[in-house]
Amino acid sequence: MAEFRAADLVARRLYEAGCRHAFGMPGGEVLTIVDALEKAGIAFHLVKHENAGGFMAEAVHHVDGAPAVLVATVGPGLMNAVNVVANAEQDRVPMVVLTGCLDADEALTYTHQVLDHRAVLDPITKATFTLTAGEAETIADKAVSIALERRQGPVLIDVPIAVADAPATPKRRRRVPPSTVAPAGEKFKLVRDWLSGAERPLIVAGLDVLADDAAPALQAFAEQFEIPVVTTYKAKGVLPEDHPLALGGAGLSPLADQHLLPLVKQADVIFLVGYDPIEMRPGWREVWDVTKQCVVDFQAVENTHYMHQAGISFTCHIGAALEAIMDVKQAATRWRGGEPAAVKAALAQAFPKDDDWGPAGVIAEARAALPPETRISIDSGAHRILLSQMWEAPYPKAVIQSSGLCTMGCAVPMAIGLALAEPDRPAVAFVGDGGFLMSPGDLTTAAELGLKPIIITFVDASLALIEKKQRERQLTNAGVDYEHRHNFAALGRAMGGAGVNVTNRAELRAAIEQALTADTFTVIAAQIDRGGYDGRI
């Protein structure tokens, strides 16, 4: 039998899980890991910051479904990755983080860059491991399996330098995937009765629909029983958002909530379908009354958050739960007053698409100019709230963003990851000027890889969302403005791509059309006035 290094067995297990890309910045402590990944068929991509590398890895995961792979060297390399690992935990992203560390004996008497990686990441990961040569493959399988559990998340494998190179024997230990579990029993019979007699049923769907690949079952269930669907932002597209029953995303916009929450309170039966409230703001805390409304929770894991309660809860496979009640005979007419259609119309009026310019005009023109199959990433900020309401997602994961942690600086590297995973599909980042300034260095990564994402930047020389909140509270203007409107278009050109400034819809349309056929990435700097989000989100 050929001799393997312990690092080889980790890399082989990741390849088996579908991983074909890894991202990071190498140091001497991870050179064997990088070598093992490449030999296993997993391309290692050099990035300019570990945080950006993690977001590129996440974007690839959203396309291929395999765990994201991030490599970080000892000490500062790991510390640079803390934000994106926390994001993976909050946003339920399966991620395997591979770090290099000093051997235990050496760490006893050597202090330079030495810190406890596992202690740092333990609060924001599902599990942490230190690799051993004797059980390298077992640890790798545990890491992959835990990361891909139905409530997905990040796992750390800390790899001592000598262990990475140590001979290791494959043991072929694999966790057996659990069987698909559907609800049953007396309580499920009661749910069937509720569904049959419901006059005003409503679905609130969340990202665990995606983990169970249950979007087709959700659409079939909603259509058969004529139930309108509200989603969280990460679940946008589980029901195509041009569908008559789709009421769009919710969770951040008070303006949208003005229309959606009254409908929730009118519902007599509410189905929480893979709903994870980590994306939602306080307005959605305990928004239904289980003493007056029939609330059913089909959930991936038990409710320990207490953000909401349900009359009946099932920890089960989401798609299997919906399929198990598809034979219910409908005994009541749904929403006699046509309230869901009225809400859908009111939302369209609240978020119009005919602005001459400003942030809404940028979003509307971009949607009209880009092909329907485009995938987009959105950074955090006021533009994210507006765009998440205006942009209709035709399929799941057409829109990716940080919704749990809501971190800035994610959209540009995510768009690079999307472009790498699907080079023939347009990938577009929407980012504020503050978020853009957090990750310009990795534009060179796009150039080096020959990728062609389009970066649309909302340039108003302000942290728009925070400035708006500061102003509304009549506080002193401080720490939210930039002295100058930075030349982002020039920065794009300096980093190896194309760059153009636009000031109206016609210029934006022309820039997008040119970017779609360009041979490099393009930064489009949309110059907008401050205050453009007032009254719009």
Image: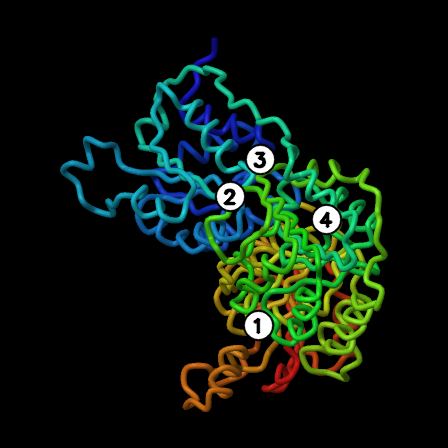
Disc 4 on helix, strand or loop?
Answer: helix
Residue wearing tag 3: 19
Q: Is residue 219 above or below residue 524?
A: above
Sequence-earlier tag: 4 or 3? 3
Quadrant of the image for the C terminus? Answer: bottom right
Q: Is residue 55 at all visible to an observer of this figure?
A: yes
Q: Is residue 174 above or below residue 322?
A: above
Look at discs 1 and 2 and give the one toward the viewer. 2
Q: Is residue 261 left or right of residue 79?
A: right
Three-letter code, disc 3: Cys
Q: Which mark is residue 432?
A: 1
Three-letter code, disc 2: Glu
Three-letter code, disc 1: Gly
Look at discs 4 and 3 and give the one toward the viewer. 4
Residue wearing tag 4: 194
10 or 537, which is in the foreground? 537
Q: Residues within 10 Å of mark 4 (few under 14, many from 20)?
A: some
Colouring convention used in this rendered image of the protein: rainbow
Tag 3 and tag 2, C-beta contact below 8 Å: no
What residue occupies the far top of the structure in this picture? Answer: 1
Sequence-earlier tag: 3 or 1? 3
Q: Residue at x 70, y 55 (%)?
A: 269
